[in-house]
Image (spheres, rainbow, N blue to C red):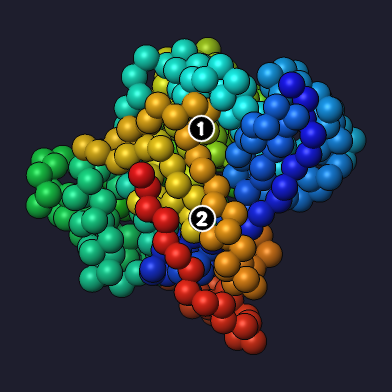
Amino acid sequence: MRITGYRALTTVQEWARPVGDANGVFADGTTTVPIVLVDTDAGLTGVGIGSHVEIAAVFAAIEGEDPRAVTALYDRMLRRAFKAGHGGALFATIGALDTALWDLKAQCADEPLWRFLGGRDRVVPAYASGLDIGLDDEALAGAYRVYAERGLRAAKLKGGLDVEADRRRLALVRDVLIEAGTPRPGLMLDANEIWSRKQAVRHVRELERDLDLAWVEEPVRRWDADGLAVVQRGVRAAVATGENLTGLEQFRPLLQTGAVDVVQTAAVGGVTHFLRVAALAHAFDLPVSPIGNIPVGLLHAATSVPNHLVSELQDLRPPVGVTADLDIEDGAFVLGDSPGLGLTVHEGAIAGLGSAPRPADPAGPGVRPARAGLHLLATALQGNDSHRFPARRETEETEAPPARRVPVT
């Protein structure tokens, strides 16, 4: 079997509410989702979700190859990009292709990827993550009641701009989960790199006067091993980070300095990257936790590693034009028996979106505020338009017909 070509598609995730973090919000509740389809001469197609950036150059490293040599092909793609560096969106392109190759490899074996990788249990524990910083209190409570109805017992909120707002919102979600039958919910706060070292310590310690935080995520810059270690020693909560790191060489200094308690990897980094990071974290006796809106590849891989802690659950529905052989029950993802990833891409539904999808933005929502990390007090940023969360969609954009929703099956 040989790889013959690829197709790059772009669909949307329809959240039906604003989504974002301390760096900005998609006020229209619509985000772009890039998809890569890898075709073979055997008639099988692998699905990967991630960036399209420089895909033609990266694909040249695997074209004509047997997709079952997936780990060797992953390194071949990294070597193709080594001169300019394989960070950011380019790393996500490699990850998308890598995930598609694992999908193909498991399809060839006629096995779901979780079983093919050696997993014993198809159930993957989850926590709720609403990308919720743009929601008022009523909408916030409503969003997390929906998660609670699916048995979610832990929640991660976006915050970091105002300690009093964070305190109120975390307590609100805690109470929602308690009312749903969780006596002591897990609470996490994601600051998305908005703080300085001392500001992070002060902000979290202030919250910890009233709240029991399981972890604080990305409190300072992703590469700041010394700064993350300062925060780790200064607060009771665990420090979680890693979703924006690209390659084992970026994780190593964080682990060596004791800067991280929960090692995270992003779904767009691919399955091979996750497996290697999980092994590295296990060598330091640390847990690993996948991050991402469509983490299907890493959910399968998580069943096969000894140190998986919990996986992020963002939207309860897949992107438009995608169905997934998985369910969400009793606070967990439940993977199905379809060969490979169990993802089906309905190209007609995606084509029907017309001009609706904007160009993919691998950086995610918003732009880092100019004054990020430069505030003494843990209060709302003043004189900075970033906290107003403007909509990302251009006002001149042509409206497309309503997109068809495709539920998880």
Instruction: Count residues near mark 1 (Cα–Cα under 10 Å), then give few for <14, some for 14-19, many for 20+.
Output: many
Q: Where is residue 396 in the image (x, y as percent from the top left)?
A: 64, 87
Q: Which amino acid, by three-letter code, is at mark 2?
A: Gly
Q: How many marks?
A: 2
Q: In which quarter of the image is residue 5?
A: top right
Numbered badge on residue 341: 1
Residue 92 in view: no
**Image side of residue 115 versus residue 209, left or right:** right
The secondary structure type at the circle numbered 2 is: loop
Residue shown at the point (86%, 35%) measured from the top left:
60
Residue 306 in view: yes
Residue farthest to the bottom? Answer: 396
Residue shown at the point (33%, 60%) measured from the top left:
166
**Image side of residue 95 versus residue 289, left or right:** right
Residue shown at the point (31%, 72%) measured from the top left:
136
Image quarter of the C terminus: top left
Image quarter of the N terminus: top right
Q: Position of residue 321 (x, y in %)?
A: 51, 55
Q: Which amino acid, by three-letter code, is at mark 1?
A: Leu
Residue shown at the point (34%, 19%) measured from the top left:
121
Residue farthest to the right? Answer: 83
Q: Mark 2 points at which residue?
A: 321
Q: Nearer the viewer, residue 199 or 392?
A: 392
Q: In which quarter of the image is residue 151?
A: top left
The secondary structure type at the circle numbered 1 is: loop
